[in-house]
Amino acid sequence: MAGKLQRLSNALRTGTAVAMLTVATFAAAQGLRGDHPDTYVVVRGDTLWDIAGRFLQKPWLWPEIWQANPQIANPHLIYPGDVISLAYLDRVAVTPGPRTEAAPIDAVPLSEIEPFLKDLRVVDSFDHLPHVVGLEDDRLRASRGQVAYVRGLGDATPGTRYAVLRPTVRYTHLLRAGMCCDTFGTDEFDSSGRYSVDFGRYWANVVMPDKGQEVLGHELMRVTAGTLTRGEAGGIGASTLLLDEEGREVRVGDRVVPVDARPYDLQFFPHPPKVQTDYGKARVLAVTDMLTSGGPRDVVALSVGAREGVDNGTVFSIWREGSNVVDRVEKGLDRDADTVAFGDKVRLPDEFAGHVMVFRTFDRVSYGLVMNGIKPTRAGYHLKHPDAPY
């Protein structure tokens, strides 16, 4: 009797193991493209998203599919030279290859987003921050090896390193639709926080009305950094900051904050939004390099952040809002569109443009990298769940 029970127990364990393998295999197979290769060798310059795009129907789901296989402890620890096998029961497996580089590949090309990780940040306000009140020899600009005088550091400790920042953009979002040209916009500042158009900026700009806006945040750009050599003492009302880093020239009015040891993530695991936002709330605010549209590997600013549950790795699909057109068959071919009431027009479907993954999150704004697309991404486009059908 004991022997029968033992054989039954072994059979149950074997059956359970086979069932678990079948479930993992089925889950992976559902995400694989029908034309996937048997193997793929990881090469320098690959990203996890790009590799997943070669053989997965939904590249942004690669962590879930790869982690369904126990032999992959960490999808980020994949190196140039490793062999990705897809031939055995449609399962994704990784075999270590002749690794010639020590650094694993990442989800995104860090070189594309490094300036937005290191040099830019978005804050609710900046008026309270210490600011540069004067420069060595009463110069108009100061650079590495020269001194800036900062007001507002108080009894800060000499030897502390500070980053010098410059306010550049105010992000806003209209509270009511139909007030202007769209529901997004950026306003530009000079170094003291006043509106200005005389400054090289990262983003495209759309002029918006001042009334009815929600201010989403103010963008600060890192100019350079320095070390505090002397605080406010002996009746002196400004601290001395020795500029010791290559960067842009410092101006009066630039802000100063302590240097963060590691203010941003270096690994990103893509996942869908944790919270569903109302239609029109999540938008592309701006496109980098002063462009009005962008494509894969372009950085965009988004109108949602931690307040809306967005974190690093959140993936959105990007959609052009469907137009409202006149049914000229019903209304007449010669009917002018302006003479037809908005409610009598036909709303066309939104049009899919691509996917974007968030890599830097602030309270009400985030930065994302366009990962793939079938048409340009433009400022004002909507953001939806990555699998949204329309």
Image (spheres, rainbow, N blue to C red):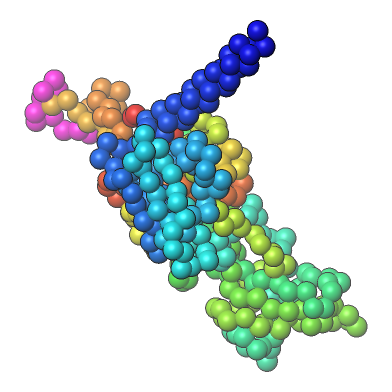
* Magenta segment includes 192: no
Q: Quadrant of residue 262?
A: bottom right
In the image, taking residue 284 as reference, residue 354 lies left or right, namely left
| Up/down of 110 relative to 58, above or below | below
Quadrant (top left, top right, bottom left, bottom right) of the N terminus: top right
Give x and y (percent) for residue 286. 43, 53
| Residue at 22% across, 31% down | 325
Q: Is residue 29 left or right of residue 121?
A: left
Above or below, 77 relative to 24: below
The region drawn magenta spans 329-338
Residue located farthest toward the left when viewing the structure as drawn: 333
Q: Is residue 305 in sight in this rendering?
A: no
x, y percentage for residue 174? 48, 41
Quarter holding the C terminus is top left
Q: Which residue is located at x 60 percent, y 50 percent? A: 362
Pinpoint residue 134: horizontal percent, then vertical percent.
69, 81
Lateral position of residue 370 relative to residue 340, left or right: right
Residue at 30%, 50% (x, y): give it. Answer: 376
| Residue found at the far top of this picture | 1
Image coordinates for residue 305, horizontal then vertical, percent: 56, 44
109, above or below 70, in the image:
below
Which residue occupies 58% across, 14% down?
8
Pick whichever, 328 or 122, lies toward us: 122
Tell me if residue 245 can be seen.
yes
Front-most of residues 150 and 229:
229
